[in-house]
Image: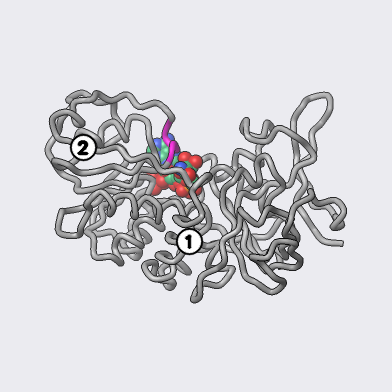
């Protein structure tokens, strides 16, 4: 027997709710690898999956959410993994279409796993989680498009959230000047402790575009917000600079003009963490091991248990989670 957070759907209202249940290995879906999950986390998508309607992501109930986890292999019919190996999983619609990490055991495809790099514990891997992994993908994409510290300040939007916090810490560690956009002024000291040198109030950037080009200010941007903010930021990028579009915490629309692309050669880089090829996943986790200071990561962590998840799911959808939540499954 092991514990899992299981969502079941009320047949009359169609609404789903979560409770902690005792499951057995026979309850888990069929797949090659069984993992003893040690830690999971709470991402924005988890908030959607934990909501009564499943955020349009969960189609079948009963369901175990949790879009990422880290732990130890218990059994494997795939040659790449053996019992005792430490692994991390993000993406592949685990926790949405497949049962996920809010469970002491998970059964998944070997293709979905990445061996945990040396120097990162399973707890630290989930302090990073999908949000931090995606932040690393965004930084790598900006570097691949020519970003260097001497190019100028880099903007991080939604900075006090999960993606934003990790992006801020990585960029500062790599020697970038980081300007952090937040709607929560009380997080300024926290963001400075992660390495931000400038705090930009959300209100400065979330108004609709009035002029397609503003002063050339940012050498790069990791954007977790989308919507009006992304549209404004495009008009403030330096010549030839790139924006990594990661999230939609502020909206899925992009009410922008094409003028920054045509007159300033600005690049808009799409970042997807779900279907990333294995080699790039490995590269990102290796970079996390070297370029994310673990003491800064520890400062972002809020510990939680399975019982805390329904509330935390609602909190993250309301933009009220600071940094990274780590769910202890041990
Ligand atoms: P969080 O909720 O932790 O962070 C989002 C932050 O955005 C908030 O903390 C807040 O930061 C800011 N924010 C919230 N609402 C608004 C608003 N209305 N207008 C402007 N800013 C707002 O979520 P995550 O960091 O986990 O995820 C961020 C986004 O990235 C989500 O949209 C998520 O779906 C997406 N994502 C995408 C991935 C991909 O593969 N492309 C992978 C992982 C996440 P502050 O308080 O500092 O202003």
Question: Which residue is under mark 1?
Answer: 282
Magenta stretch containing residue 249, yes or no?
Answer: yes
Magenta stretch containing residue 60, yes or no?
Answer: no
* Residue 223 placement: quadrant: top left
Question: Which residue is under mark 2?
Answer: 266
Main secondary structure along the magenta-highlighted residues? loop
Q: Residue at x 22, y 52 (%)?
A: 146
The disc at residue 252 is: none
Which percent across, then down, holds residue 200? Answer: 26, 47
Q: Are marks 1 and 2 in contact (CB under 8 Å)?
A: no
Above or below for 86 versus 111: below
Which percent across, then down, holds residue 97? Answer: 67, 39
Side of 126 relative to 265 (left or right): right
Which percent across, then down, holds residue 130? Answer: 52, 53
Pick whichever, 22 or 323, lies toward us.
Answer: 22
State whether residue 160 appears in this view.
no
Give the class, few, some or many, for how many residues have Cα within 10 Å of label 2's Cα (few <14, many ≥20): many
Specify the quadrant that holds the C terminus.
Answer: bottom right
Mark 1 lies within 8 Å of ligand 1 (Cβ measured): no
Above or below for 78 versus 256: below
Side of 146 relative to 160 (left or right): left
Pick whichever, 36 or 22, lies toward us.
Answer: 36
Q: Which stretch did the figure color magenta? A: 247-251
- SS under mark 2: loop
Q: Closer to the camera: disc 1 or disc 2?
A: 1
Above or below for 93 versus 148: above
Q: Earlier in the sequence, mark 1 or mark 2?
A: 2
Q: Residue at x 85, y 51 (%)?
A: 27
């Amino acid at each position: 027997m092991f514990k899992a957070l299981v969502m079941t759907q009320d047949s009359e209202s169609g609404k789903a709710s979560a409770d902690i249940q005792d499951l057995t290995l026979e309850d888990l879906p069929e797949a090659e690898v069984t993992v003893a999950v040690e830690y999971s986390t709470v991402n924005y998508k988890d908030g959607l999956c934990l909501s009564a309607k499943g955020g349009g992501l969960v189609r079948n109930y009963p369901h175990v959410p949790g879009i990422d986890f880290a732990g130890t292999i218990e059994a494997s019919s795939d040659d790449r993994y053996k019992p005792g190996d430490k692994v991390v999983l993000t993406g592949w619609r685990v926790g949405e279409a497949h049962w996920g990490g809010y469970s002491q055991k998970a059964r998944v495809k070997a293709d979905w796993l990445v061996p945990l790099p040396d120097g990162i514990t399973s707890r630290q891997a989930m302090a990073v989680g999908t949000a931090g992994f995606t932040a690393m993908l965004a930084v790598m994409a900006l570097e691949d498009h020519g970003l260097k510290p001497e190019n100028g300040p880099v903007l991080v939007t939604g900075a006090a959230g999960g993606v934003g916090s990790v992006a801020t810490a990585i960029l500062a560690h790599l020697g970038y000047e980081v300007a952090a956009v937040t709607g929560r002024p009380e997080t300024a000291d926290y963001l400075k402790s992660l390495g931000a040198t400038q705090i930009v109030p959300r209100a400065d950037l979330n108004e609709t575009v009035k002029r397609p080009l503003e002063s050339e200010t940012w050498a790069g941007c990791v954007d977790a917000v989308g919507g009006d903010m992304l549209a404004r930021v495009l008009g403030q990028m330096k010549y030839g600079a790139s924006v990594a579009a990661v999230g939609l915490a502020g909206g899925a629309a992009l009410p922008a003009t094409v003028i920054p692309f045509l007159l300033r050669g600005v690049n808009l880089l799409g970042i997807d963490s779900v279907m990333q090829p294995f080699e790039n996943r490995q590269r990102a986790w290796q970079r996390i091991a070297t370029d994310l200071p673990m003491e800064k990561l520890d400062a972002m962590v809020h510990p939680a248990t399975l019982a805390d998840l329904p509330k935390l799911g609602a909190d993250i959808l309301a933009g009220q989670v600071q940094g990274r939540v780590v769910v202890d499954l041990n």
